[in-house]
Image: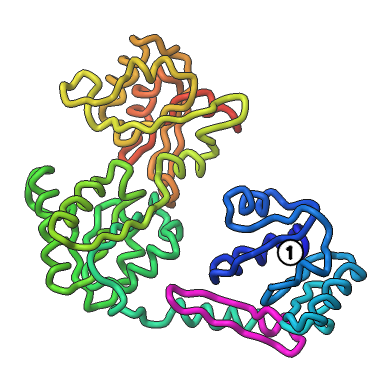
Amino acid sequence: MVGGGAVATRRVPALLAAGAVVDVVSPELTPALRAHADAGRVTWIARRFQPSDVDGAWVVQVAVDDPAAAAEVSTAAEERRVFCVRADDRDAATAWTPAVTRHGPVTVAVTDDGDRRRALAVRDLVANALESAPPDRAAHTGVALVGAGPGDPELITVKGRRLLAAADVVVADRLVPGLLLGELRPDVEFVDAAKIPYGPSAAQEEINRILVDRARAGKFVVRLKGGDPYVFGRGGEEAIACAEAGVPVLVVPGVTSSIAAPALAGIPVTHRGVAHEFTVVSGHVSPDHPASLVEWGALARMRGTLVVLMGLKNLPEIAKRLIAEGKDPRTPAALVQEGSTTAQRLLRSTLGDAATDAAAAGIRPPAVVVIGDVVTTLE
């Protein structure tokens, strides 16, 4: 790759994904390319191009905006019978890069005879067709722990949605976006984990049993969980149960409400000069309960942002404990109810008044509690 600017930045990742050994010749690099070089993914030759740089190469890509310099590279490549791609002048090139789309294991490349816009349009049509094509269900086995995001069905990852379309069995939590479930094939076995008629611990054991049982029967199982599987979602317990049973597990991270809900309500969990850290804790256990693992005293002394999930019920006790441990009751606080959905609500308050204000406003679960100066940063 000759050049270290924007064009090279766009093209290098595809070369690396194809397994190419990439040398980048350029006096300067963009920060993204510099990161690749620092990580050892590419070799940076920090100078202007020399004809000998082409020696031993299979293909040369020219990504400079100087026609004379680009022509020099083309000449050196032609003399050595090496393919040369020209970003500045396709007619002067001896090879072209196609418009590419990737969908799971399928890669489609569309080339053209000069009409790049048409090739891109065809590429996009193919991409849309692949999205709607029946998935290769035989390619998937075991259990996939998929994070569905905070509530908006469009916030599930592309990979998560693709695996969901390939599932034979879907075991879903109550906070999973309902529109995602409406897209399941008619033959998919759907298990509503919220309706398993046991206590919390026994219900988790039953979920683990279902995951293992269906996977051992040759079914591809998607365990669809709100937010991220490993953020207070018991995904670790399910992964352990599958591993102990010899069932392969694939984890697909999800957008966690601990970050998404505040962000969508206009609250950044970190902000330069305001908060250099944020801590996410579960509030489902009262601070005074023997089962609590949270060091509330340490949290009270922190200057950053505190995000509490599942803490609405225990918010009076949580606020009281933080204040008792030294947290200023005037610290800004906010509650975001059902973040990312059409029912999203935002309540701004202070640590000392948050519980009372939430009750008066009728805030209901699921709600994310944010405590810290970031609450008023963008107000």
In the rendered structure, the answer to whether residue 233 lies left or right of residue 370 reads left
In-front residue for pair 90/48 = 48
In-front residue for pair 55/88 = 55
In the rendered structure, the answer to whether residue 374 lies left or right of residue 59 reads left
Residue 185 picture quarter = bottom left
Outermost residue, right direction? 68
The residue located at (32%, 56%) in the rendering is: 251
Outermost residue, bottom direction? 113
Q: Is residue 102 magenta?
A: yes
Q: Is residue 324 above or below residue 295?
A: above
Q: Is residue 274 above or below residue 365?
A: above
In the rendered structure, the answer to whether residue 96 lies left or right of residue 236 reads right
Helix, strand or loop at label 1? It is: helix
Give percent across and percent down for residue 283.
28, 30
Q: Is residue 25 above or below residue 300?
A: below
Which residue bears the numbered disc 1? 7
Q: Amino acid at mark 1?
A: Val
Which quadrant is the N terminus positioned in? bottom right
The residue located at (25%, 71%) in the rendering is: 141
Which quadrant is the C terminus positioned in? top right
Give the residues drawn in magenta, as a range: 96-119
User: Badge 1, how many Cα within 10 Å: few under 14, some, many 20+?
Assistant: some
